[in-house]
Image: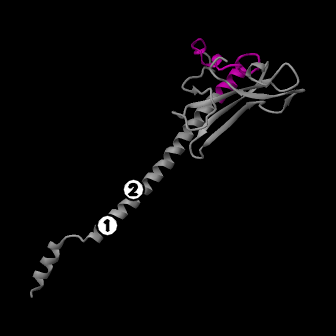
Amino acid sequence: MNTNNIKNNQRDRGFTIVELLVVIVVIGILSAITIVSYTGVTNRANTASAQSSAKNVYSKTEIYYVDSGTNIYPDNLGKMTVTATSDKTYFLSGVTFSGTLLAAAPGTPSTINWFRCGTGAGNPAPANLGEITAVTGARIGYWNYATPAINYTDIGKVSGTVGTKSVACFITTVVGT
């Protein structure tokens, strides 16, 4: 038998099922690695965006504290978001406020929680949002897509006491309340 005939027979034979299965398995493993990596990158990017939104609210709140002339924190978000304040340095846009505690990833990373913190008229801590008479600070909640959990950034006094009055924080349900 001629060696050229043997080479021609092997060339015509093609791939075996085992060879094809090995290639399919390798492609599957590479796809799985890519998908997991992409998910991790997406989660980190969404967290960075949410954190940026929270920092924006933090900065604008601090600017309001100084620019208001009274050195108080806003008692509602409407003071920073209404069109009438669009010429102010503390004007806030591009952020969505959720009136319910973020228990899962929101639709957009720019969705945050805003908690008004303060003291009430009496000595016990305020029992609800309406009982806060003196705003001492705010708590900003944003979703961390990587952990997944809510993270907080605090401004001013959000716990403990101010003088003899206890501080409490409550989530605002809508802008302006």
Q: Position of residue 148 (x, y in %)?
A: 59, 44
Q: Residue at x 65, y 34 (%)?
A: 141
* Real-space CA distance between mark 1 and mark 2, rounded to the nearest whole angstrom: 15 Å
Q: Nearer the viewer, residue 94 or 122?
A: 122
Left or right: where does residue 28 sit relative to residue 108?
Answer: left
- Amino acid type indicated by mark 1: Leu
Dot 1 alpha-carbon crowd within 10 angstroms: few under 14, some 14 to 19, many 20 or more: few
Secondary structure under the numbered disc 2 in the rendered image: helix
User: Where in the figure is residue 162, as x and y percent of width and height?
Assistant: 85, 27
Screen quadrant of the N terminus:
bottom left
Q: Are marks 1 and 2 in contact (CB under 8 Å)?
A: no
State the quadrant of the C terminus.
top right
Is 176 left, or right, of 39 in this rendering?
A: right
Q: Residue at x 85, y 30 (%)?
A: 161
What residue did someone put label 2 on? Answer: 31
Amino acid identity at mark 2: Ser
Numbered label attached to residue 21: 1
- Which contiguous range is marked in magenta? 58-86
Q: Is residue 78 above or below residue 137?
A: above
User: In the image, which is nearer the foreground, mark 1 or mark 2?
Assistant: 1
